Amino acid sequence: MATATAALFFFILLLVLPFPTRHHVAASEASASESAPNPFTARAAVIRYWNRKVPMSRPQPAFLLAKLSPLSAVDSATFSSLAAADPSALSTRLPALCAAARLLCSPAQANTYSATARKDDSSAFASYQNSNFSDYGTGASGGRSAFKHYSDDLNLPVDTFRRYSRDSTGHNDSFASYAPDGNVVTANFTSYGSSATGGAGNFASYDHESNVPDLKFTNYDADATGRRRSFSSYSDDTNAGDQSFAGYGKDGDGVPTSFTSYANNSNVIGSSFAGYGQGANGANDSFASYGFNGNVPENSFRSYGAGGNSGSERFSSYRDQSNVGDDSFASYAKGGGAATADFVNYGNSFNPGSDSFKGYGEGSAKHRVTFKSYAGDNTSFKGYAKSGVDFKSYRNSSVDPSSSSAGATASLLSLPRAAGKPSNRWLVEPGKFFREHDLRRGSVMPMPDIRDKMPPRSFLPRSIAGRIPFSPAEVRRIFGIPADTALGKAVGDTVAECERAPSLGETKRCATSAEDVIDFAVSVLGSDVVVRSTATTAGSNADVLIGRVSGANGGKVTRSVSCHQSLFPYLVYYCHSVPKVRVYEADILAVHSKQKINHGVAICHLDTSAWSPTHGAFVALGSAPGKIEVCHWIFQGDMTWTVAD
């Protein structure tokens, strides 16, 4: 019925529109597809909306047009009718909608490999993706499974391993180049290696340079005996994700695990270990170069080694050279027997983070816990063991030495930092922030990485997006997104950020359609507006030469609306008004040839008084809130609106 109504509506529109003459048809027939888009497409609707809302003959913004829905006239009418009748009906046509509208949707049902479907556990998988392994290698005796180029360079990989190598004996498995360069990565290992005896597993280059990983290991090596596990280069250089280990090595016997180069150079990675080594016998775990040079690493260890016997954990160069960071250890080695924990070079961050230890070593027998070069201001040792804990070179200026527990050594030494300026790339990425006087003709300056790291998507027509309830549960249901995936969590985060109360002096709106973006910009700035964005990514991560520079509104102090992408199945922009700024356009030239390679847009914030003192701009440039202006480029995919010149 809905489809019939749409067809009737389409027919009526054809009747009321004037038909072109034969002469006009002959003159324009060859170029009609390029110069006169079908008036019933979603793109044509936005163009008409722009002309109506911005009636000053301002050119249609190419940046915005490139992100419009590619839906044809028929598809636009069909899916709009479905959404109008019942948004849930979109689920029945989801694959067609995702393909036609260029959306970010969960992959099709994964291939399934089971114990009965594949007996040869020694086979190698050279290249595969989006697969589901159930009971794979269960009960295997000997042999080896090797996964190479696992889900490489995918936009939205979802991989599941259930009961992998469970109850196996002497079976080895390895994952080489696991999900590198992925965008929104979900990997789930459940009962992986549980109750296995002997054998070894290796993850090499695990999730390298992915964008938003969500990695889960549940009951990993639980109840295993003598099974060795190593993670090399684990989620290095990744951006803003989470990884969790639940029941890791729980009740195992002699299960050594090593993490080498764990989450190095990563940005806002959250790691959670629950029941790690809990009740295990003779566990031997080591974390080397853990969270090195990262930005705000978040680590949580719950019941770490609790109730274990003769376990040994070692953290070497833990969170060293990172920016801020937070660590929580709850029931750490609590109630264990003869446990050993060794932290070397702990918490030597550039900016202070937070550390929380609850039930630390409490109730343990014959344990030995050592912190060498502990560099955190920490007063959170609750339920602190009265003996068997040793701090060497403990730099904590906020603690009175007399308050230390009996038997514990806490030497409050002032440890000098390494000479020279910190080199943490998250703090001082060259060119990320600069001063207004740096943006002048002839200036050579570093250009940061301005690439758009979001997966490609388009706006939905307002007639569809406006009908979809903006709630995590409804969006996940309509688009078939499991909540416990990277994309499912991103949907929840986006809605939460959109529903957050505005900051002091901020006016904000989350725009779910191109029309919404135009509406917000016009409501703040008036109808005579222009939108700008940096043209390309040329010059990223290199020194560039600044050519001609011009200021919007003659370089006067103005007001702007900045819009930033959010991670969602379709394009959603977080738009907010920013007062007291100057916006500049600049030709970007190659340093040696002096040829133009890009056209950049930069915004300078003149009032930074409300910014945090630890904001990266002040770390990179010096000074403090309210004392300097701070400028930055408009990155690819983002945009800024101002009143037209």
Image (tube, rainbow, N blue to C red):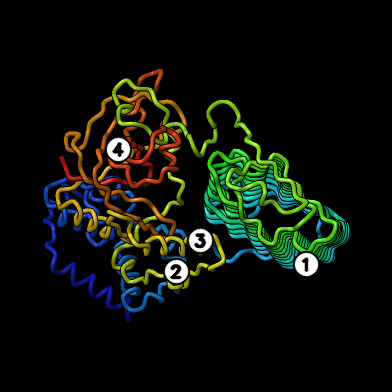
Amino acid found under the numbered disc labelled 1: Ala
Does 156 sit above or below residue 35?
Answer: below
Residue furthest out toward the front: 402
Residue hosting label 1: 115
Question: Where is residue 163 drawn, in percent x and y?
Answer: 75, 67
Residue hosting label 3: 487
Amino acid found under the numbered disc labelled 2: Pro
The answer to whether marks 4 and 3 mark residues whose Cβ atoms lie closer than 8 Å is: no
Residue hosting label 2: 472
Tell me if 257 is positioned left or right of 628 in this view. right
Return the residue nearer the eye: 639 or 581: 581
Q: Tell me the distance, in whole angstroms, between the alpha carbons under discs 2 and 3.
A: 11 Å
Residue hosting label 4: 604
Determine the residue positioned at 51% across, 63% down: 489
The answer to whether marks 4 and 2 mark residues whose Cβ atoms lie closer than 8 Å is: no
The answer to whether marks 2 and 1 mark residues whose Cβ atoms lie closer than 8 Å is: no
Secondary structure state at the residue bearing disc 3: helix
Amino acid found under the numbered disc labelled 3: Leu
Q: Tell me the distance, in whole angstroms, between the alpha carbons under discs 4 and 2.
A: 35 Å
Secondary structure state at the residue bearing disc 4: strand
Return the residue nearer the eye: 189 or 304: 304
